Image (tube, rainbow, N blue to C red):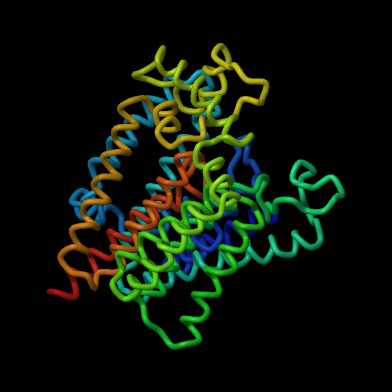
Amino acid sequence: MALLIFGFLFAWLSYKDIKLAIYVVVAFLPSYLIRSSIFNLPFTLLEMMIILVFLSFLIKNKLSWLGEFKNNVFFWPMVAILAIATISLLISPNWLKAAGSWKAYFIEPILFYIVLTATIKSKKQLENVFWALGISATYLSLIAFGQYFSGWNMPESFLKQDGSVDRVVSIFGYPNALGLYLGPIIILFTGFNWWSKSKTIIQALKIAIILVSFITIILAKSEAAIFSVLLVWLLGGIIYKKTRSYFIILAILAVLTLTLIPSVNSYVSEKIWLRDWSGIVRRHIWQETWAMLKDNPVLGAGLAGYQTKIVPYHIGKFEIFLYPHNIILNFWSELGLLGLASFIWLWIKFGLVNLKAYWQNKNNLLNLTLLMVISQMLIQGLADVPYFKNDLSVLFWLIIGIYTINLKITKNVKS
């Protein structure tokens, strides 16, 4: 009943002020954790909000947005991804579960992308989208801080033997969910702090969001997130002229630390070369996934089919995970070779257009920021799953959408 009332109120909000409704969706991407059903059809609060926003958008705009959408630089990669995701749904060994993945990871995020890019039209509105993400990072972090000291809502598997908290999870079910969500936002706000100069108190607020989010991924011990954020900070800081000298010094200090302190060198080497338990498990997962994909190279396992298809190849004593924990193997397994190729096409296209914009004008710091964000996602994705999750798939397309919006704003300013 509460969700039904909320649905009516949110539908009214979407119709009256669709921009505010968009900000609410962005601020509450983790709301996919709130689930219910209508006539035995399951849904999440996040997808209810996205569908209501899209319907309101459709009622107001009908199909007037379609022409502009067809001219979108990412239109054909999107078409390819949707077509291949649909084929992967049809061949899945678990059709019902695949249907849920299809709508949650492909249909709804792209619908939201359409609304976002057609509605947000000014720098101020785009900054509001950033602040909405900052709100989500803040409440997730504050909950994690409280959890670290109180043990509230902690799964037993992430507690120490004495009952104290080992790795925080905030409202999620596992720690790496925090790293996967907060990592891109940390990088986005780093660039936001560079390219959008505001009053001192606003700049301080941006830095505070970066700091609390980074402390949270440390408390979650999300190693791939920590490593990817630090690496992208270092590379981005060297590329950005105003911070270059400081980050070159930091890079030299990092190299000296790794060279001169054996314990640090040993720890970093163990993590990079996957010699710890987590790394060993991942290597086993990749070996068995590679064996499965050699027998199913074109179609992969089908959408949501990995856990079923991998069974004959499973060699470890550990559990069978939802995905292979590697961005290439994840997409190959779920969508087959053509699906993987379509996402690579999208990544390359996204990288090239942002690189070109930054190369032509070094003041285009938002383009540098977007390159940093997608790099962080890809680096973390080498050992994790940065897409196949309700909030992460919407976040991914939101990042793609930020480029689209910024391009339109830039063109309007020039004209």
Q: Of residues 22 and 373, which is closer to you in this image? A: 373
Q: Is residue 72 left or right of residue 182?
A: left
On the image, which quarter does residue 316 sit in? top right
Foreground of the two, 413 or 321: 321
Give the residue displayed 58% in from the left and 46% down from the top. Answer: 267
Q: How many marks?
A: 0
Task: Check the image and report above or below for 350 versus 128.
Answer: above
Q: Is residue 399 left or right of residue 391?
A: left
Measured as percent of width and height from the top left, residue 224 is found at 52, 47
Residue 45 at least partly seen = no
Q: Where in the figure is residue 68, as x and y percent of width and height? A: 21, 55
Depicted 175 relative to depicted 373: above or below: above
Residue 70: x and y, percent?
20, 48
Quarter-of-image position of residue 247: bottom left
Using the image as rendered, state which of residue 212 and residue 336 is in the foreground: 212
In this rendering, position of residue 165 left or right of residue 200: right
Q: Does 121 appear above or below 225?
A: below
Asked where in the image residue 157 lies, by quadrant, the reply is top right
Image quadrant in which the C terminus is located = bottom left
Residue pushed farthest right? 162
Is the residue 98 above or below the residue 159 in the image? above
At x 51% / y 40%, what residue is drawn? 384
Q: Residue at x 21, y 55 (%)?
A: 353
- Left or right: where does residue 363 sit relative to residue 312? left
> Does the image show residue 162?
yes
Task: Identify the residue at image location x=44%, y=23%.
Answer: 302
Residue extending farthest left: 415
